[in-house]
Image (tube, grey):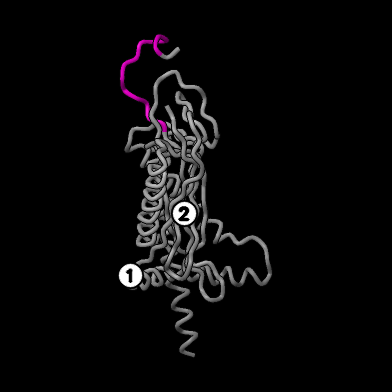
Amino acid sequence: MSDLIVLAALLALGYFFGRYYEKKHYKSIIKREAEYRHIAAIASRIPPVSPTPLTSMLVTGSVVISVDYFKRFLASLRSVIGGKVVCYETLLDRARREAILRMKARANDSGADRIFNIKLETASISKNARGNIGSVEVLAYGTAFIPVDVPVKPQESSS
Amino acid sequence: MIVSNMEIIPGKHIKEHLGLVQGSTVRTKHVGRDILASLKNVFGGELRGYTELLHESREEAVSRMKQQAEAIGANAVLNVRFSTSSVTQGAAELFAYGTAVIME
């Protein structure tokens, strides 16, 4: 009986706090995505030829997000019948967007205006004994290009 | 030292190719962090301690990779890739590798 009460308490805690965190997080993601929209994040491998001088720099952004107890419970139920596990989808979506935002924030701090060759890396860390996912880490990295501020005469030294 | 995950850098060309360089580190946080993280597993949300841990370790891996590149006389590391794996509960291995080159 006491086990059931503990389980119910954990589920309730997970449900309310998890929902609260997720809403808050999505709100902040949407706000910051608008803020950093001026930095172009491009997954292409080869950058176009730039007429102005640039310096480059490796930028990374990473985040570790944990799933709450309620969602983990839901997912374990879901794995019995199979199908789409929506609660993990939002977890990964949040993690990826947050990682990209952090990478952009770092690029913004160093004055870059575009990031090329973006790679995303996902790792599930701290799995529990039953093999359920506890938390995921997402790393986003790319090469940021920073325009150099030296005034150049057009088409003289570069060609 | 230029570190980049692109294969080329606009406006520069590669003079010499020196092969693969790598750096890795395995790190763990103290027990307090692990306990906090397992509490966070109930509520959900970001595990700041672990984010910090992985970030620090990644910097370490990159700096070891740079050291190795410097030792063989490179001035740039291109096509850098990262990989993460959890070795045991609470410990993570961070691995960075790339191609060391001499650019002009």
- Above or below: residue A107 compared with residue A73: above
- Disc 2 is placed on an element classified as strand
* x and y, in percent, of residue A34 in the image: 41, 38
Q: Is residue A11 magenta?
A: no
Frontmost residue, B7 versus A80: B7
Frontmost residue, A59 versus A37: A59
Can the viewer see residue A31 in this picture? no
Q: Which residues are magenta?
A: A145-157
- Disc 1 is placed on an element classified as loop
- Above or below: residue B18 compared with residue B46: above
Q: Is residue A113 left or right of residue A71?
A: left
Which residue is under mark 1? B30
Q: Residue at x 46, y 67 (%)?
A: A68
For the C terminus of chain A, the image quarter is: top left
Q: Is residue A146 magenta?
A: yes
Identified by mark 2, the residue type is: Phe
Q: Is residue A94 left or right of residue A80?
A: left
In the rendered image, which quarter is residue B104 located in?
top left
Frontmost residue, A99 versus A118: A118
Q: Residue at x 48, y 28 (%)?
A: B15
Which residue is under mark 2? B95
**Disc count in the image?**
2
- Above or below: residue B12 compared with residue A128: above
Share a chain, discs 1 and 2? yes
What subunit carries mark 1? B
Q: Which secondary structure dominates the residues rendered in magenta?
A: loop
* x and y, in percent, of residue A133 in the image: 53, 67
